[in-house]
Structure formats: C-alpha cells, structure tokens
Amino acid sequence: MNITFVTYSLARGGAEKLLCIMADYWAAHGNSVTILSLRNRTSDEYSPGPGVKIIYLNQISSSRLFPLKIFYHFKRIVSLRRNFRFTQADIIFGFLVSASVLSIIAAAGTRKSVVACDLSNPFILPGNKIWRFLRNFTFLFAGWIVVQNKEAEVYYKQIKRKKCSVIYNPAVVPERGVYNTESKIIAAVGRLEYVKGFDILLRAFAECRAQFPDWSIQLAGEGSQKEQLILLAEKLNLSDAVQFMGWIDEPWSVLSNAGCFVLPSRYEGFPLALIEAMACGLPVISADCPSGPREVINSGKNGLLFPAESVSGLAEKLRTVLDNIALRKQMSINSAETARAFTVNNIMRDWEKVLQNCTIKDT
C-alpha cells in the first residue's frame, strides 16, 4: 500500500514524533511510505528511518495580506495534488488541522481517502475563525477523523457521526529499569511555550522548596518562553535548583533518572510525554486540564491530578509525592502497568483499523 503523510514540518513536537513512529512502523511492514513536508528541512526536526521517503515542498511562504494568503494556500494545494499523483497515494494522512484541510481540498475528485488527524483540542484550536470554519466544513469530506481524547471525539461525531476514532499516543521507551527511589529530580518535558504551563511548575516548586531542599527540576525542551522561564527561575530564587536541558532527542535519558514527573499544561490534546514518563515507571503529577490526562490517570493510584493553572494545587501534590517514598513506589508500579496499553504495536492496531475502514481506490 502507498501511504502518504502531509505535515507542515517535522519540527520536534508530539504530533511530528507520532508521525515518524507511524511512518517507520508501516514502512517496516512492507508499505511504501512518503512524508510531504510543506516546510523545507531544518536542523531541529525528527528523522524517520531509511525506509521512509521525505519530500520537502518549500511551500511555507506567508503574508498578512489576505489575497496573498489565498494565493499561497492555492500553491500548496496544487503542489499537494501533484505529489499525491507522484506518490500514487492510496491513503493520505493529514497531520494537524491545517495540513488536513489542505489535503482534503487537494484530493477532491481523486477518490483518494484522506484521514484528518486533529491531535489538539478542537474546542480551543484553531483560534482563527476562518480555519475553524474550513476545518468543520472540509472534515465532512474526510474518509475518517482521528483524535486523541474522548472530548474531541464528542466534538467531531457531531460532524462525521460514526467516522471518528480516538487513538492515543504510543510510548517508545527502552525496557523499564528499577525505579530510582533515591532520585531527587522532578522531570518535565515539552515545548517551552505558555500552553505547557512550566511557569506554574516553577511557582509551585518555589512554594515548597524550603521543605524539600534536596529536590531539583530538570526541564527538557526548547521554545519561545525559554528566556522568560529562566528569568522567572531567577526571580523565584530557583536558579540553582532548575536545570534547563534544552531539546533532548531521547527523553527517557532524563526520565529514567528522575524521582517523579510533572505535566503542568494549561490544555493538551493527548500528552505523549506523560505516557513516556509512565512507561519509565515514574510517579506522575498532572494538571487536570481540558482533554487528555484524566483519561489516563486515576488520581491517587497511578498518578495525581491537580486543577489546571492552580499553583497552590500543584504545590500541594508535590508535597504529597515528595514527602512519601512509599506512595512514590506504589505509583511507580501502577503507572508502568497503565503504560503497557500504549505500546507501539497496541496503538498501531488501532491505526490499522482506520486503514481498513477507509475506502481506498486509486485514481
């Protein structure tokens, strides 16, 4: 089967990492897999295995002028349609909303099935009203819609009725070792952006640091908020207790040495970093933010939830976990058990069902 993925880029993020996992899996199982990236190659992107072909379309030009925006999108659609013929795509996966919208339009009249993958929160994103309208309209013509949480499924089943599936992120980590009960490291992983809520983590840790002077934070990731977070750490007198790790290709190198993991996001689609932390057997603390974490965490058993954006709520959960080694040990066992459902093979079986459900016909 000829499988084509469409994405704006392979820049390091959860959706792009999932795309590469899927591409590698299907290529290893005898399929011809191509990724169409609208943006040119950069140094800070994921690289799939040698069995996957990548075509960079150099179609990322933009403008504030509305007529030019229309023109650039038209060029993208033409380029995609031409490359769908070139790759002889049997099925097309649009990764994230804009790529899905453009792919559905580009495939119109070709009888090629497009799977629209919205891995964010459709109640919040996209913020642009025009893109919201285009998403809701074009997704009517998608062969299938894939989301990552049950809240998003409710949203899209109003549009596509039964043609929508919830498929969670897989965890790709080495075989779990023994949980390090002596570790005094709080791990956090993600893009350093406002939505990820790392400012909340710093403020909460500052509230309880005096009680736990031996503990520190390792924060892995890059983003536009990095300088602000460094300044905030200085303001809170945490400079000696917070290590900004930058981007790390293999997050388990941080997770495997940690004593616990915190996800302080303001909202999520479905947090890959959370599943990776649980697969490493870490006790986890997560914001009970819109969509995602509450579908995985049974608070008090395999992790703890705190009200989203609540600094005091996170500080309370930190005190609970850091002060109780027996609780950490039990949560470690339970989180690792939960993560077993999220292996690549288990998750890819769900994606295989999507392939089977879509009518695939060559042009």
Image: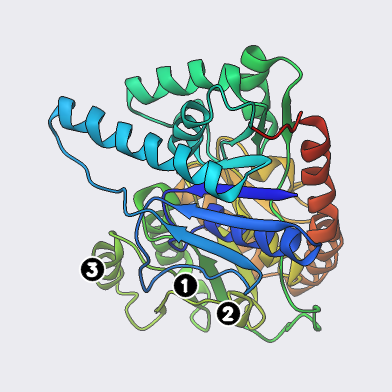
Q: Tell me the SS state at disc 3.
A: helix
Side of 126 relative to 237 (left or right): right
Q: Between residue 268 and residue 258, name the one nearer to us.
A: 268
**Amino acid type, mark 3:** Leu
Mark 1 surroundings: few (<14), some (14-19) or many (≥20) residues within 10 A: many
Which tag is nearer the camera, tag 3 or tag 2? Answer: 2
Q: Could you say which disc has been placed on residue 254 in the image?
A: 2
Left or right: where 122 falls relative to 144: left
Residue 251, relative to residue 363: is it above or below? below
Q: Name the residue at 16% across, 25% down.
A: 67
Report the side of 278 relative to 53 (left or right). Answer: right
For the residues labelled 3 and 2, the Cα–Cα distance comes to: 23 Å
In three-dimensional space, the C-alpha distance between marks 3 and 1, rounded to whole angstroms, equals 17 Å
Asked whether the beta carbons under mark 3 and mark 1 sit within 8 Å of each other, the answer is: no
* Residue 234: percent from left, percent from top: 25, 73
Mark 2: secondary structure:
helix
- N-term mark: 2 or 1: 1
Q: Which secondary structure, mark 1?
A: strand
From mark 2 to mark 1, how far is it between C-alphas? 8 Å
Give the labeled residue for mark 1: 220
Answer whether labels 2 and 1 touch (C-beta < 8 Å): yes
The three-letter amino acid code for the residue at tag 2 is: Val
Q: How is the image coloured?
A: rainbow
Tell me what residue is drawn at x 67 percent, y 49 percent. 3
